[in-house]
Image (cartoon, rainbow, N blue to C red):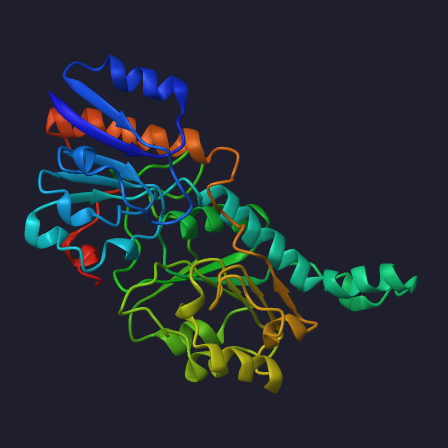
Amino acid sequence: MRRILIDMQVDEPRLAQLKSLPGMMVDLVTPEDLAHELPPELVEEAEYFFGTLPPTNFSLMRKLRWMQVASAGYSQLFGLGFVERGIRATNARGCFDIPIAEWNAAMMVNLARDMRQMMRNQDAGIWDRGARFQREIRGLTVGLWGYGGIGRETARVSKAMGMQVHVLSRNGVEPVKDVYCVPGTGDAAGLLPDRVFLKGQELEFLSGLDFLILAMPLTPTTEGIVGERELRALRPSAYVLNPSRGPLIRQEALLAALRGGWIAGAAIDTHYQYPLPPEHPLWQFPNVILTPHISGSSLSPHFRERTWSIFLENVRRIEAGEPLLNELTQAQLSGG
């Protein structure tokens, strides 16, 4: 009998499918917003775990063989000894590709047409038909730093809008398999980029962009990856979008770039503090769009069905001895 512990909102149809599988004993707990302690008697027996965060009494999970996290990011697993203990882990890559790619597209259009100023004009009853409100993004170049699921779906959407797509990826762009993807989305074959840049070509990549979009996870090696050097390499007419994680960009460098006009503006969905305090200087820039980490979250309308679909398929695969969807490598679990 396989013991499965689930710390997630329930998707009833897929839970029924899970329970119909032979040899499965499913324990459900009521999920909370933050990491919390789970009943020790359940934690100690769990072989498979499905949740966003490991429980605070994770050390009791001595029988754990595999964990499915309900997020694309996986930094919550660092330092827990997954590699040393031989515990496999998979993430929710692919669940947020569509909403975050749509946020990216919306922010590019909004920044290019200065929608913030148009809304201020509306509030003030000002009739201004200036040329800056009439720009097109067709023909402009978007740069994706990272080419996972979010980057690939953003590339597909951007190409549909007539943009040039440049990609910076330390391993180049290759076809992917055993990765969850909503049918009809993404770029599994890796054929969409117009140019691909490799590690060591960062400045060349940045110098040719109209939009820089960060599409990588936060790890010890990517924290602060964008600093003064990188922001100064951008054109003064370029915009920066960060739907990934706030600390990928060094905060003081971003503030300096906005104050000094090194870049034209930014759209920021992930932040340095949660919630971002009202006195934070980022609120004050007229050329910055701030959103409260909503580009893709557990409140997205398809989040539950997609994460449960990944989990259910992975239960089938692990029992059959097949490759798992979205499996994290030892290097990733070690923070590489």
Taking the image as drawn, is residue 29 in sight? yes
**Image location of residue 44, percent across then percent down:** 13, 37
**Image location of residue 295, percent across then percent down:** 53, 50
- State left or right for residue 121 relative to residue 171: right
Which residue is drawn at the image coordinates 16% and 14% (left, top)?
22
**Image location of residue 21, percent across then percent down:** 21, 15
Q: Quadrant of residue 181?
A: top left
Above or below, comparing residue 86 to residue 81 in the picture: above
Which residue is drawn at the image coordinates 38% and 49% (left, top)?
34
- State left or right for residue 277 relative to residue 242: right
Which residue is more in the foreground, 296 or 156? Answer: 296
- State left or right for residue 75 relative to residue 283: left
**Image location of residue 127, percent across then percent down:** 92, 63
Which residue is more in the foreground, 335 or 163? Answer: 335
Q: Quadrant of the C terminus?
A: bottom left
Taking the image as drawn, is residue 138 in sight? no
View extreme (bottom): residue = 260
Which residue is drawn at the image coordinates 27% and 20% (left, top)?
18
Which residue is more in the foreground, 40 or 192? Answer: 40
Q: Quadrant of residue 128?
A: bottom right
Above or below, comparing residue 6 to residue 240 in the picture: above
Q: Quadrant of the N terminus?
A: top left
